[in-house]
Amino acid sequence: MITVPIKDFVPEQNAEGYYLVKWKDVKTGSNHKEYIDYIFADITGVMSVKHWPPLSEADYRFSVGDIVKAKVAVIEYNGAPQAKILKIKPVDNPEDIDMSKIVPAAPIPPKEMYDEIYATAEKIVDEDIRKLVLTVLERNYEKLQYWPAAKAYHHSIRSGLLYHTLRMLRAAMGLCDVYETANRDYVCAGVILHDMEKIREMNSSLYGVVDEYTREGMLLGHIVMGVKAIAKLGEELGMPEEKSLILQHLVLSHHYYPEYGSPKKPMMIEGEIVHHVDNLDANIYDMDLALRNAKPGSFTAGVPTLDRRRLYKREDQK
Amino acid sequence: MITVPIKDFVPEQNAEGYYLVKWKDVKTGSNHKEYIDYIFADITGVMSVKHWPPLSEADYRFSVGDIVKAKVAVIEYNGAPQAKILKIKPVDNPEDIDMSKIVPAAPIPPKEMYDEIYATAEKIVDEDIRKLVLTVLERNYEKLQYWPAAKAYHHSIRSGLLYHTLRMLRAAMGLCDVYETANRDYVCAGVILHDMEKIREMNSSLYGVVDEYTREGMLLGHIVMGVKAIAKLGEELGMPEEKSLILQHLVLSHHYYPEYGSPKKPMMIEGEIVHHVDNLDANIYDMDLALRNAKPGSFTAGVPTLDRRRLYKREDQK
Amino acid sequence: MITVPIKDFVPEQNAEGYYLVKWKDVKTGSNHKEYIDYIFADITGVMSVKHWPPLSEADYRFSVGDIVKAKVAVIEYNGAPQAKILKIKPVDNPEDIDMSKIVPAAPIPPKEMYDEIYATAEKIVDEDIRKLVLTVLERNYEKLQYWPAAKAYHHSIRSGLLYHTLRMLRAAMGLCDVYETANRDYVCAGVILHDMEKIREMNSSLYGVVDEYTREGMLLGHIVMGVKAIAKLGEELGMPEEKSLILQHLVLSHHYYPEYGSPKKPMMIEGEIVHHVDNLDANIYDMDLALRNAKPGSFTAGVPTLDRRRLYKREDQK
Amino acid sequence: MITVPIKDFVPEQNAEGYYLVKWKDVKTGSNHKEYIDYIFADITGVMSVKHWPPLSEADYRFSVGDIVKAKVAVIEYNGAPQAKILKIKPVDNPEDIDMSKIVPAAPIPPKEMYDEIYATAEKIVDEDIRKLVLTVLERNYEKLQYWPAAKAYHHSIRSGLLYHTLRMLRAAMGLCDVYETANRDYVCAGVILHDMEKIREMNSSLYGVVDEYTREGMLLGHIVMGVKAIAKLGEELGMPEEKSLILQHLVLSHHYYPEYGSPKKPMMIEGEIVHHVDNLDANIYDMDLALRNAKPGSFTAGVPTLDRRRLYKREDQK
Amino acid sequence: MITVPIKDFVPEQNAEGYYLVKWKDVKTGSNHKEYIDYIFADITGVMSVKHWPPLSEADYRFSVGDIVKAKVAVIEYNGAPQAKILKIKPVDNPEDIDMSKIVPAAPIPPKEMYDEIYATAEKIVDEDIRKLVLTVLERNYEKLQYWPAAKAYHHSIRSGLLYHTLRMLRAAMGLCDVYETANRDYVCAGVILHDMEKIREMNSSLYGVVDEYTREGMLLGHIVMGVKAIAKLGEELGMPEEKSLILQHLVLSHHYYPEYGSPKKPMMIEGEIVHHVDNLDANIYDMDLALRNAKPGSFTAGVPTLDRRRLYKREDQK
Amino acid sequence: MITVPIKDFVPEQNAEGYYLVKWKDVKTGSNHKEYIDYIFADITGVMSVKHWPPLSEADYRFSVGDIVKAKVAVIEYNGAPQAKILKIKPVDNPEDIDMSKIVPAAPIPPKEMYDEIYATAEKIVDEDIRKLVLTVLERNYEKLQYWPAAKAYHHSIRSGLLYHTLRMLRAAMGLCDVYETANRDYVCAGVILHDMEKIREMNSSLYGVVDEYTREGMLLGHIVMGVKAIAKLGEELGMPEEKSLILQHLVLSHHYYPEYGSPKKPMMIEGEIVHHVDNLDANIYDMDLALRNAKPGSFTAGVPTLDRRRLYKREDQK
């Protein structure tokens, strides 16, 4: 079966293919019967899709973040296209699907990114720090393959957390060549650990789509969760207290400003570096994304995640 | 021996008594010899005191927060009185000293305050919460007797932490009578736990004087330390996760504003109450202190901890 | 006649009953004829209602805040139900209507709340203060029965002003038991007077619905109006100047922060208490409201009046 | 007797003349005897002056803001000149003294300024407004002659309030020629009334020196006091309510920003004008003062009242 | 041909006349054919206008800011009127059109405003300054005739820049009569130059409508552009450096606050005046506009450009 | 002659050597005669030095930033050492002096830093940009050898501007390896140009000591001066406008926040990188400096340039 990309949906025609469930709600129509209100997505766009009654129990089984196989009829409603479901099924063999057409993902295969990060961590000289970082990487191996770095902001793509971590790590290691008073071990560990608890702060589907924050994520946030996780693992591995506290501090301070969640600012050069590469990597990601479809020689619209800044694409820029 | 209160030191006379070491520094004079620069205090005032050479090894033994037995010669220096040490010794029998003349302390005996707090905690209905709170109280029993609530701000007095906790607890329990949707167990636990890690955030002498913050206190702060402590104890006692998370959240959110150290605002009524009684109790403490020596019908100078507000003492106020 | 609750309106059917006019606008249709655009409300929901031409003069007589007796035909418009008026009349005997089904109101009868507040005020020891407070209560007796505490925020319900005042008073009196340096008379008076001029800052219908602010309310605000009112009444009753000034100051400072309308922060403990119970009562009201319909174990959406905080409802919470 | 200007005091010599008491404190010396610590001032400078014991009762009679006739002996103390009192007396005939050498004052005689303001007010067309403004001017006639506009900031000079008002009035009337939608009557009244209650917010000596704020000034501030005063006088004179409310609003809003004391921003053009000429006049006053002694072609030090701005004096500027 | 004003468009009728193109977008319909989506405007209102296929090449020629001659058919769509184009042509003889019915413009003819400004500039005493200011006026003569002062905010009308400059100039010259230490030459020059580079910061049609900012406008902004322009022209005309720097500083500092684009605050009285008349003129413009259609004795809605302030229109105000 | 380091000055002895004039003021003593008040410095400390009368004309010739050859007598004054001048002369052969003992300087020889920067700039691919950057380097060659990067903050040392630029350049080029969408030419140019006008914003002695800002520096600041300089040089060299504007924008936006002097935030990735390496390099410089003399395992005092953060020095840190 060849998937019809969402941008090619034409009113009064049917379309078929694999789509991502981006949003789902069960509603009651004016006839007092339930119907399901979906938003479907692929990398070409999004579409409002209704599943009208009668509905079987199986029709309710799909969740945000799932990929479904569906056949829909496209209509025009209030001037915009809309679709209604004719058939909907779970995916039989996920491995048969060209995921890259459906969900946006990091441009490097996750296994490759993981390996580069792991290899960098193996070069940590201090044995205590190295053991803790490698343990964290190993215990989160599965989820790191697809976890995004956010629900809606920068790197909210499949394997986004790994991609964000990898680029930060490359940038940070390069800075350590320039700033020789910075301790490479702590910088490397700080980068790898800084967002790790996002894995437990929110729930992601296998396709890197986050539906909701977890209870602990809401009540504490990934920064404080990260501090707790390091403290606990440090004890488990017998790490000396000073080393554990420094790693906890690097995670606690990486957002820099209290209004962004860090009650302490970095008290050491290593934390200053972790913060700046984190901030820089997030901003460059958002800038690249906003500039991708802009016309050379023009300005983008204001980018919400960059304080509504409008960006300029040079005339010679691709 | 009768202690001469500091406010009664007269130039050209000697004085003797028990005094608190409020500050200490070893300096080198213009003759290239070391001398010790002290500030002594009792509840009547403070005085600059020098210990000139020659100095024996024993002369270096006193630390900030200690109480010493000293004989000094008072002189006038640049228009202000100053003292030099003639004799200085450790206290032999602390119990012989009338501490209330030397270090400011809470107006209720610590044992009595502890007992009232403990008794209130025993009324917690939920067994998990009660067990955790009572364990925390028991494990901190010794230090709670004298620990202050701060290094320099509100309740920086002997047993100040207990006094702050007790008054907050009374206020909070009264509010629970009015706001019936608030869960008394969580409010009670939140109040008792909210500042408990101040005991490990800073070091206090037996007389409630804090010299420095601890390494963990500096790098993480008592709020995040409190979250970690509850998480750990909750696991140790087998507390269900939701209960532990709520208690952690109450501690995490009790400063309310990120710029005051809380990355999350209270997400429940119980946290709203803990925050308000904490803030109210601290402010009333500082107001009472500033008004104590003011003249009825007049205004105090601006109080630094109250945004430099000047306070009014009514004409009929004592 | 049995009122059909708004949540039970079904397209293609008629409905009849008593409804609150929540909003009203006279518009001109594409046929150049006027029609009336209403929003009707009861405690189950709101509904867009049109009164199409031809319209008699009497048809224009209803105002925001009125309760009307109406018969409407329900249709579906753009996927949402809408109603058009078939018959509309004023209420003959308001006392026959079960108001509690139509307009949200405080959970305690106004008379009962008034009496408790009055009784508390009678215990004010200082004769001058007591006389002023009782006079204020008596002169506002009628309006206090139904006046809300706000146009759109916390306690914007029938008798909301009384309810807000009562709960604050209970809380504040409890705090005075803990904080003995606070003067009970001023605290009691401060609570009762703090929002009293809301009665002249905005106009409320008998059902506690505010349509607009008054001219004085817009140009000065209830805080400054409160200061003026106390100054004037104090003179009328021969109150000594210091007492009057303190009461004026308690009202002036109760919002605490200049950006919320208080040019002065409280300069006395009594003002600190009035502010905190005001703030706490408002927040708890909004929290209770937001949590009422939430599912146990889940988070609400962000609450606009609480800085968009999301709230958590415990799994065991009703 | 010829007064020796303070800048010409020479150690080891005596000096005699009329001086302003800028500050006074009664202290106890190391000999347990009281002495009086003064700061004397004239327009050339300030000097620390001690009145050593023995002191007669009469020696205590002088207050901040007084002018005294004194003979002092100048010494050098810690590298700076200091004086001790040999003789001190009240001024017999104030009219004999050349005040302009002692206290800084507005550059126009107060009577002249008052007359120009009064004449402008007489041109107010609206009878109600004119009557109120003229009444206010007349009732404050005496104090306006010497009252300063502030304790320590702009126009804190003798007759400073009148001078500030006059220049604002000239500026505002000129702006009304340009902005014809502005109502001249309200602008004129707003300017004259805006700071009038400074007369009751603080206490000034006859020489324009403020020692302290009044109780009402501290608890309410001159803005809220101005609102009350207009409301009361408006009632007394039978002014229609709308007119009175507008005048109250102009006073209430003239500081523009809540953090500077205005809970409301101007809701009318007239208030916008009053605010801008107030702000402009204060800043130009402070700029002129700071530039007076600067060298052409150079920058002043940072001016505290102008956000620490450094000012530039042009090379051709006098 | 008599133009039908937009407010008189009636569904089911045709209308004809001259209209301003306020907004334009080329879209693709559900039939995969392009259509043009316009917003037309005149001084009575705005209207959504569609140009449906088939479209000739000439149909694409109109841009935002153009005036077109059009015949349209009015329909009702979703309850609001909408128009579709029947015929559309460029304007043959612009001079035949009564522009005042189509585009909002300053109330004084541009030539007259220019002449008054020029005449004021001719009175500048300093030859260097006068030459520079007159040169700037002459070189921008053409564009000044119609350029607006903004894209969307205050004075975004035909000849708005000239009108804003003129009223500021009148106000500023009046203030120089009051504040004699201010240098009239610099004040006059500062006012005339302060916004001049708006002419190169954004593109305006002949009718004073701005479509977009220029590249330089976006990357630098008119303030920094103004500094550059004066520096360059100063060099060209041989102006002494100090004079040029002062003029640059007046332009650089005229927005006063860094968050509004001025990295420096005014360091001289002249800059203080330029800032205040700029701010005052902009606010009064917006106030006049908001009050124009308000009912006497009532409040406007919140005005976005005035921090959402609601304005009061007096009962006697026209 | 062997210079006595300032830290080794002993009261009652004479000292001789080369010292930096850090501060100078001419004052008048109580005997009405002028004396010169100096602060002398070398890398070991600072000392108050007085040059008492009689003074010859030559004695006035030294300025802040000069190095002098002096012989002084050390005394003790108010408990602190102070010196008076016995002999003072200009330096005959500056090249004979070991400057590194007197003025703090960058740890790399300026010539070497310049060469590395120049070599990096030569690799700029775009001919226009390369030519402009090389021209700027060449024209500032002399001053770059010793100019500091600030008057009092980070890199306020001899050759500090070059050192700051070099480390930023290394860091930025490393980041360009990671972020491939960034244009290396603009990043390289942006870094080299960003602070270049500090050379004309303030005056430095040959020893990297800044006495005062220039007039242009005060009125405009180095950021706006940098924009002007690039605009002018771009025209001179015939650089296409877009390229020149981008370089101007990179300089204009490099402080990021308006309150730090940038009216625009970076609108391109290259500007984001320039800002972050600027900020990071400044902070790391200040952190290294503050940690240099700290004890391992302890915290520094609050560092003023880092928001008063206290820094932690690890136990294993040198």
Image (cartoon, coloured by chain):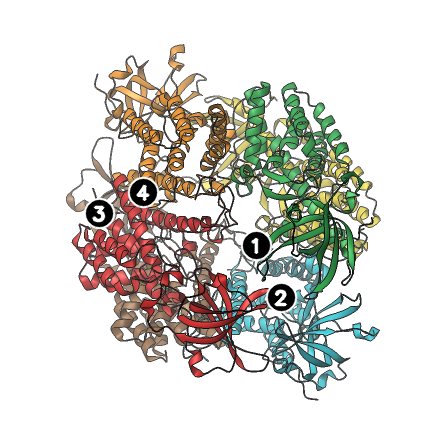
Chain colours: A cyan, B yellow, C green, D orange, E red, F brown
Q: CA distance from mark 1 to mark 3?
A: 55 Å
Q: Going by the image, does A33 lie left or right of E293?
A: right
Task: Find numbered disc 3 in the image and state the secondary structure of the residue it sits on.
Answer: strand
Find out whether the residues at labels 1 and 2 contact each other: C-beta distance under 8 Å: no
User: Circle 2 sits in a helix, a strand or a loop, which is it?
Assistant: helix
Mark 4 surroundings: few (<14), some (14-19) or many (≥20) residues within 10 A:
some
The subunit letter for the residue under badge 3 reads F
**Labels 2 and 3 positioned on one and the same chain:** no
**Label pair 2/3, CB-CB below 8 angstroms:** no
Disc 1 secondary structure class: helix
Which residue is labeled 1 in the image? A259
Q: Are marks 2 and 4 in contact (CB under 8 Å)?
A: no
Distance from disc 1 to disc 2, alpha carbons, whole Å, reads: 21 Å
Which label sits on residue F88?
3
Residue D217 x/y as whole percent: 48, 28
Question: Which residue is label 4 attached to?
Answer: D177
Tell which subunit mark 4 falls on.
D
Report the residue marked by disc 2: A193
In screen coordinates, is A102 left or right of E234? right
Tag 2: amino acid: Leu
Q: How many marks?
A: 4
Among the two numbered marks 1 and 2 on one chain, the one whose residue lies closer to the N terminus: 2
